[in-house]
Image (cartoon, rainbow, N blue to C red):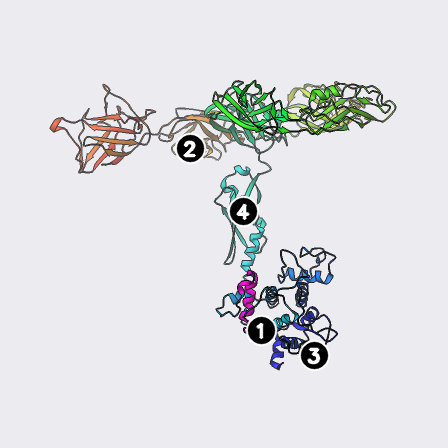
């Protein structure tokens, strides 16, 4: 080896630690350079050079074994030690976080350490997640590992560099290598690390110790100085990292998904900005192409990254409004809220013009109110009003008043929604059908082509019994001449169905429900009568198996017939014991709804004597909409016995006894009630704090040995006297486009803030009042008269949304925003928009709206005073009766005008070689009017086309 070679080695060998690494992985036992088995070997120069450099050693017997095959484990240890020598750390979780699926915490500790190092640094990735430590390493994988290792240690990108070079390749069998290895083999080829004299690389062949020594030797000798370290664009790294931080998610915004697009965008911008933690990266959000998607652009300097995310919107905590009102079908209307409302406050809160509701129900989550109309809903822009409703979370807070319009006419015919037929055996005898909407109890039903007798259980449910439907077969049901409540008929609709088989026996568990009730819970819906007939007096036994008296079993409401209560009526159950272990006999007479019987059994249940006194757990002051206290409710820890509790003594915060507070209270408690309601005889507004003292034995529980309450006190704060700061407007009306707003008290007027004569404080159909509108106040300043200008209402609207806001009374109270509907009338004149020659006497005119000709004389519409016609530069003189008009059949916006001047050869005709213009005029006898009787707009000039 020359001194030049030694210098080159020193330049590229990565320190003394690297030598120790190669020694341990290639030759695990130290030895001298003079190996007895390398003389004349092809790889002898490389082995000698590495030995001279102290990189490798041989075996104790003086051999090197150059033809011994290397395993993947050998290479992992080699490269791992190399990386550690260069300052790379062994991950602290190397023994608990397996980097390869086929390693275990019990695997060789050294292998686990270096497997973690090479995997973390991308030098050795394994095969399908496995290390395959005992397998031999192929030549192609050796190439990959060597290139990755030098990339890592030298901080260069050899593959990228070689890819950009134009060179003659020596390797002839590159195509046999896997795709990933081809670029690595190209690197070895480009730098002549492969042997040009042996162009076949044999990528799938194994690697020997000698071959590896040669490749390593050549790679270390290679001058990579022309390969520049990759330029890291720190700005690009930052924006790419920020893009990873930006994720899809839910964003809170006022009004949730009903917020304006602008407010949604602002909320998403805030959300995205909060996600990005990369320094100086700016995130810009715009709406995406699809609803709910947003495009995010991340920039820093010249670097940019883009990402699209999906976002959903949550309501804000203080949102409490109606989100939508929809007619579901002819008689059902649904109102949806942004927050849960109080079920006790839903009565008579929804009205639709011309619709009478007969019932309403609130969904379990309190956010959907369903109403049923007495008659089919058939509405065109009918006014919908949802009055404020108490929220479930806080009865003092109500939803916003909702005013809108609804147009609905049921034109959808009823269909079959679902069919259910079950059996515990092979044949079902009953089926239940649900329709898509409520229907009349009429029509015929066929099952498998045979007419059957239906039972209309309710408006959407049809039951059929007495059938013989085999399981495992497809059956057909057909409804003939069914009719929904709007009178829309379906002549025939059918559906196929199969019978589901449920032969599983129901099972039961027992638990105590209070002191003297046993709760039986089944895992299936049960036949109620069978349970009541099976669990009778005598079914419950004491410890000595004597009968314990019970009364009729009842199904628990809302349990879908899966839970039943057994009331224990025996007296002195706890006379001598604090608890009793009872036995319940459950016979196989208990059946589910398909007739499946439970397995006869007995089960024990322990009832414990109730020795706990009822305790007051809190109070609630109930006020009506006027703010008057109507009752005081005191909650208790358990159900109470029936009775009439004594009234509390009441003392004001000044220590004065109050004997007739709210005119006195009335109260009564029904058995099982968990609260005492003290109802005011004279509801009134109350302020300040009052001490309520409740006497001992106020209430009793329902225990066998009655427990009575102890005395207790509450200091109830009714709040401070409220000075009204707002007032409300109850209605506004319009006639002939003059709106009259009656305020309940005098309001500000003139050029001051919050003035009732300020146009900006009113809106119609969501828009400001038109320019030219006048507003005046009466002498008492309680009535505002708003006159809409001519040419301001384009079409009739019987339910235009009208809003009044930002107005104050003369005493400084603020008007609560008022929203209602008004009827306004079209006051826009029809406008001539075009004219076309039909012949040399006739012109067809087209208007901006439908025209109704008026003021006929002897059924002839004379319009000589309604138009001026110019031919070229000459005005056509028209006398009475010389220009006539007629409607164009089928085209209500068109009118034909015909010149009737002279006759025969002296008749006036249009010179079609010249430009012709028509100018509109008005007169007291004009015939050109819209359907509201408004005369055409004068002074409109149009060129006549030919």
Q: Nearer the viewer, residue 385 or 814?
A: 385
Whether residue 175 is in magenta: the answer is yes
Residue under label 1, please give it.
222
Q: Earlier in the sequence, mark 1 or mark 2?
A: 1
Number of marks present in the image shown: 4
In front of the other: label 1 or label 4? 1
Q: Which residue is mark 4?
A: 309
- Pointer 4 and pointer 2: residues touching (CB < 8 Å)? no
Q: Residue furthest right?
A: 576
Q: Which residue of the protein is positioned furthest toward the left in this rendering?
A: 905
Instruction: Residue at 85% x, 25% y: name it.
Output: 543
Residue 253: x percent and y percent?
A: 56, 40
Residue range corresponding to the magenta coloring: 174-198
From the viewer's perspective, is 157 left or right of 103? left
The residue that mark 3 highlights is 34
Which structural element holds mark 1?
loop
Tag shown at residue 769: 2
């Amino acid at each position: 080896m020359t001194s030049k070679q030694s210098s080159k080695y020193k330049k590229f060998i990565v320190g003394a630690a690297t030598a120790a690494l190669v020694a341990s992985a290639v030759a695990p036992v130290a030895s001298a350079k003079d190996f007895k088995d390398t003389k004349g070997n092809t790889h002898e120069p490389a082995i000698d050079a590495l030995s001279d450099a102290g990189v490798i050693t041989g075996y104790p017997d003086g051999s090197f074994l150059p033809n011994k095959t290397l395993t993947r484990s050998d290479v992992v240890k080699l490269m791992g030690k190399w990386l550690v020598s260069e300052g790379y750390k062994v991950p602290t979780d190397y023994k608990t976080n397996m980097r390869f699926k086929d390693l275990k915490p019990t695997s060789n500790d050294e292998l686990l350490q270096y497997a973690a190092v090479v995997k973390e640094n991308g030098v050795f990735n394994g095969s399908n997640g496995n290390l395959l430590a005992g397998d031999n390493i192929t030549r192609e994988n050796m190439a990959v590992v060597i290139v990755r290792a030098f990339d890592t240690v030298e901080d260069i990108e050899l593959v990228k560099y070689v890819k950009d070079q134009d060179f003659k390749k020596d390797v002839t069998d590159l195509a046999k290598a896997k795709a990933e290895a081809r670029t690595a083999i190209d690197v070895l080829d480009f730098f002549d690390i492969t042997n040009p004299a042996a162009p076949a690389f044999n990528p799938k062949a194994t690697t020997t110790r000698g071959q590896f020594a040669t490749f390593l030797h050549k790679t270390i000798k290679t001058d990579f100085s022309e390969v520049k370290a990759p330029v890291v664009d720190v700005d690009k790294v930052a924006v790419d990292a920020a893009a990873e931080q930006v994720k899809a998610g839910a964003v809170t915004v006022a009004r949730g998904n009903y917020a304006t697009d602008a407010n949604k965008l602002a909320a998403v911008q805030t959300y995205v900005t909060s996600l990005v933690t990369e320094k100086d990266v700016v995130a810009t959000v715009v709406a995406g192409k699809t609803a709910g998607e947003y495009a995010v652009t991340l920039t820093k300097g010249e670097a940019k990254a883009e990402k699209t995310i999906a976002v959903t919107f949550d309501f804000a905590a203080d949102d409490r409004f109606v989100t939508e009102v929809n007619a579901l079908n002819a008689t059902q209307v649904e109102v949806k809220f942004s927050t849960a409302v109080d079920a006790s406050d839903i009565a008579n809160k929804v009205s639709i013009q011309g619709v009478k509701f007969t019932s309403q129900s609130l969904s379990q989550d309190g956010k959907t109110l369903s109403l049923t109309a007495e008659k089919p809903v058939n509405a065109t822009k009918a006014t919908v009003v949802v009055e404020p409703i108490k929220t479930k979370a806080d009865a003092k807070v109500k939803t916003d008043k909702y005013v809108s319009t609804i147009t609905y006419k049921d034109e959808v015919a009823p269909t079959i929604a679902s069919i259910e037929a079950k059996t515990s055996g092979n044949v079902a005898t009953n089926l239940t059908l649900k329709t898509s909407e409520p229907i009349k109890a009429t029509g015929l039903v066929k099952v498998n082509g045979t007419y059957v007798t239906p039972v209309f259980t309710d408006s959407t449910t049809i039951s059929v019994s007495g059938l013989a439907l085999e399981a495992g077969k497809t059956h057909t049901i057909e409804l003939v001449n069914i009719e929904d409540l709007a009178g829309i008929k379906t002549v025939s609709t059918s559906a196929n169905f199969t019978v589901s088989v449920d032969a599983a026996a129901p099972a039961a568990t027992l638990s105590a429900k209070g002191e003297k009730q046993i709760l039986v819970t089944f895992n299936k819906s049960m036949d109620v009568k069978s349970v009541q007939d099976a669990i009778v007096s005598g079914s419950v036994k004491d410890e000595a198996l004597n009968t314990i008296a019970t009364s009729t079993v009842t199904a628990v409401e809302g349990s879908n017939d899966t839970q039943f209560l057994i009331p224990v009526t025996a007296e002195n159950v706890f006379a001598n014991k604090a608890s009793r272990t009872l036995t319940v006999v459950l016979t196989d007479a208990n059946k589910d709804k398909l007739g499946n019987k439970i397995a006869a059994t007995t089960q024990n249940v322990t009832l414990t004597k109730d020795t706990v006194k009822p305790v007051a757990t809190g109070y609630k002051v109930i006020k009506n909409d006027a703010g008057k206290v109507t009752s005081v409710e005191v909650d208790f820890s358990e159900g109470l016995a029936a009775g009439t509790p004594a009234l509390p003594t009441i003392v004001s915060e000044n220590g004065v006894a109050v004997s007739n507070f709210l005119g006195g209270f009335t109260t009564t408690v029904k058995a099982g009630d968990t609260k005492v309601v003290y109802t005011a005889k004279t509801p009134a507004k109350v302020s300040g704090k009052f001490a309520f003292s409740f006497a001992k034995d106020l209430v009793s529980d329902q225990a066998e040995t009655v427990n009575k309450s102890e005395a207790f006190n509450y200091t109830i704060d009714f709040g401070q006297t409220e000075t009204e700061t707002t007032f409300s407007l109850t209605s506004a009306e319009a006639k002939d486009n003059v709106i009259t707003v009656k305020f309940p008290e005098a309001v500000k007027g003139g050029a001051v803030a919050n003035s009732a004569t300020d146009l900006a404080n009113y809106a119609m159909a969501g828009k400001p009042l038109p320019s030219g509108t006048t507003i005046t106040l009466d002498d008492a300043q309680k009535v505002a008269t708003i006159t809409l200008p001519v040419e301001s209402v384009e079409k009739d609207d019987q339910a235009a949304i009208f809003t009044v806001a930002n107005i104050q009374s003369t005493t400084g109270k603020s008007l609560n925003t008022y929203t209602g509907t008004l009827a306004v009338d079209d006051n826009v004149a029809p406008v001539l928009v075009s004219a076309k020659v039909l012949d040399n006497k006739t012109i067809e005119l087209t208007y901006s709206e439908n025209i109704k000709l008026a003021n006929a004389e002897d059924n002839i519409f004379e319009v000589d005073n309604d138009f001026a016609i110019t031919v070229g530069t000459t005005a056509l003189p028209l006398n009475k009766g010389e220009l006539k008009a007629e409607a164009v059949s089928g085209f209500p916006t068109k009118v034909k005008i015909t010149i009737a001047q002279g006759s025969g050869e002296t008749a006036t005709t249009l010179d079609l070689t010249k430009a012709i213009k028509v100018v509109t005029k008005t007169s007291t006898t004009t015939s050109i009017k819209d359907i509201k009787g408004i005369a055409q707009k004068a002074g409109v000039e149009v060129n006549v086309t030919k």
